[in-house]
Amino acid sequence: KQWYQRRVAITAGELLDDDYSNLTKADVFSLALTVYELGSLEPLPKNGAEWHRIRDGKLESVKTMSSPLFKLLTRMVSNRACRRPSPALILKEKFLMSVKKEKSTDCDSALIPLL
């Protein structure tokens, strides 16, 4: 049951409504909430008013998260799949491009500038 509740916390609304027409954009939604949860260091709600607010595409700002990352995540959790960026567009974000250019031997250190 806990696994199911965790999945619902990051599942796009259209999938909960049995609309599987754009699974890529549903994955974008789930990725955004996973990154948001990691950046906020708080578990996502499993139900209630806050859960519905997130489903409406509204995230609370996180002090430790950069503004460009927060803005990207907000677009990624739009309540309309057609408004979410594609993975290709996400990878073209300027702030992500600067991170990709950094040379690092430590895999984890490349993510630090994002949070």
Image: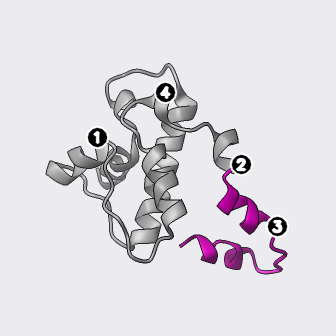
What residue is shown at x 81% (from left), y 78% (from top)?
A: 104
Residue 82 is marked as: 4
The residue to which callout 1 is attached is 56
Q: Can you tell which quarter of the image residue 43 is in? A: bottom left
Lower sequence index among marks 3 and 4: 4
Q: Badge 2, how many Cα within 10 Å: few under 14, some, many 20+?
A: few
Q: Amino acid at mark 1?
A: Asp
Q: Which residue is mark 3?
A: 101
Q: Is residue 65 left or right of residue 6?
A: right
Disc assigned to residue 92? 2
Percent across and percent down for residue 105 are 83, 80
Which comes sooner in the sequence, label 1 or label 2? 1
Marks 4 and 2 in Cβ contact (< 8 Å): no
Disc 2 from disc 3: Cα separation: 12 Å
**Residue at left offset 49%, top offset 65%:** 67
Q: What amino acid is labelled 2 in the image?
A: Lys
